[in-house]
Image (spheres, grey):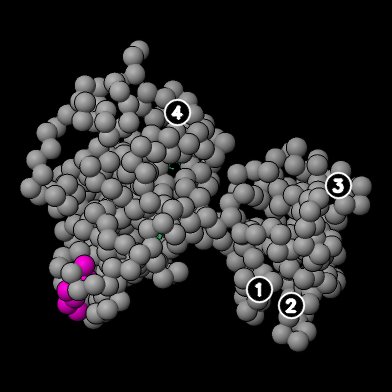
Amino acid sequence: MGRRATGAAIVLSCAALIFACASSSSSPETTPAADGGGLETGTGPDAEADAVIIGAGPVGLFAVFELGLLEIEAHVIDALPQVGGQPGELYPDKPIYDIPGIPVCSGQALIDGLMRQIAPFKPRMHLGHQVSTLLKQGDGRFLVETHKGLRLLAKTVFIAAGVGAFVPKRLATHGIDAFEDRQLFYSVADAARFAGQRLVVVGGGDSALDWAIHFATQADDAPASVNLLHRRDSFQAAPASVARMRALCAAGAMRFVVGQVDDFEQQDGRLAAIQVLGPDGQTQPLPLDALLVFHGMSPKLGPIADWQLALERKQLVVDTEKFQTSEPGIFAVGDINTYPGKRKLILCGFHEATLAAYAAQAVVAPDKNLPFQYTTSSTRLHRLLGVDAAPER
Ligand SMILES: Cc1cc2nc3c(=O)[nH]c(=O)nc-3n(C[C@H](O)[C@H](O)[C@H](O)COP(=O)(O)OP(=O)(O)OC[C@H]3O[C@@H](n4cnc5c(N)ncnc54)[C@H](O)[C@@H]3O)c2cc1C
């Protein structure tokens, strides 16, 4: 099974960090924020944080590392169910040639390497959460809230949101969204829930084929039937997956239907069938119990545009000393920011994250005078990294 197919809604370490901190000593004083909002008295955040990073792309992940070296623990939030941003989502298997010191690596290998690099700092990962609200509190901290209701109270915020939150491309069929999360799904959190069901998987990429093959070959909790629906008889998926799918169809383990969802039928409030528009212009009903749609992901700037930070052509304006936005304490790094000479390159984002981390240190712990040190020779940094000494060459 491919990486995407295993991408269930994971929230790493999330349960561990949820605690109530509504006591008067830990609850922040609130003043009305710019839009009149604010953390209400008695409704504590789920966690207090020195740094919250919005976006688990390469730049957000590297920010964890630089903050970690400065002894600042980070929470990381991403709308996707897995880390990786653009390299992980858009070009996991393509080669990258311009990461310093790495002549060539794939998008996914870069992300895997970053995850290994930040592991010593044990960042709290909140995946499958889109940040919807960012509000300044009366004590100068920021309330970061996700669409699922996770609330973090942060001294500093790093917006590493790239080109926006990756959200699934949804079916355009009017009214079908009423069945979302009941019979219509854009990701699989629990494959067993489809046991005994008539399943229709829509799409022609790796995710659609991986899941269709998975369900057609599942020994336990197998669906009653698996139909793969794609608008034409050619696929963007790996050739080996296409061959496997065709073999399973020939063996009667699944069926491939050419066409696209045109309409749907409901019965007693349940999605009973989709109307499939075929290449001949005719529509046919396809009865089902569950519809899994994999039409890919598209980035949405979404709520970031509403956070009252200075924007220029949908990008956050920052300075080049601290990569700070128009709001002190909120930094923007990577593809989401703009400044004179900006280049949307991973290595530029790494530099931005490094300087922003130093600037954040002055906010998080202004009295803590950490000396500037190299990772090669500092025993303090070796301790943080969990190594006895720098690896010998
Ligand atoms: C096909 C392709 C090839 C490329 N090749 C190269 C190359 O060879 N070299 C190079 O240097 N660059 C390359 N790039 C550009 C590079 O991928 C980007 O510069 C880099 O990914 C930017 O990293 P980032 O962490 O800033 O943002 P992203 O990688 O875009 O990650 C941002 C993350 O933030 C999340 N997010 C956004 N908004 C929210 C929200 N409100 N709540 C929660 N999460 C949110 C998104 O889901 C996403 O995961 C390439 C890009 C593409 C598309």
In the image, which is nearer the foreground, mark 3 or mark 1? 1
Residue 97: mark in rendering: 4
Most foreground residue, 239 or 31: 31
Observer able to see residue 373: yes
Percent x, y of residue 89: 53, 47
Most foreground residue, 373 or 352: 373
- Report the Cα–Cα distance between label 1 and label 2: 9 Å
- Report the Cα–Cα distance between label 4 and label 1: 43 Å
* Circle 2: residue type: Leu
CB under 8 Å between discs 1 and 2: yes
Q: Which residue is mark 3?
A: 248
Compared with 45, 383 (above or below) is above
Label 1 residue SS: loop
Q: Earlier in the sequence, mark 4 or mark 1?
A: 4
Q: Residue pushed farthest right?
A: 251
Q: Earlier in the sequence, mark 4 or mark 2?
A: 4
* Circle 1: residue type: Arg
Q: Which residue is mark 1?
A: 182
Label 3 residue SS: helix
Compared with 288, 245 (above or below) is above
Percent x, y of residue 213: 77, 49
Residue at 32% of width from left, 31% of height from top? 386
Q: Is mark 3 within 8 Å of ligand 1?
A: no
Within 10 Å of the Cα at label 4, are there few (<14), some (14-19), or many (20+) other Cα atoms?
Answer: few
* Circle 4: residue type: Tyr
- Placement of the N terminus among the 4 image quadrants: top right
Q: Earlier in the sequence, mark 3 or mark 4?
A: 4
Q: Which residue is mark 2?
A: 271
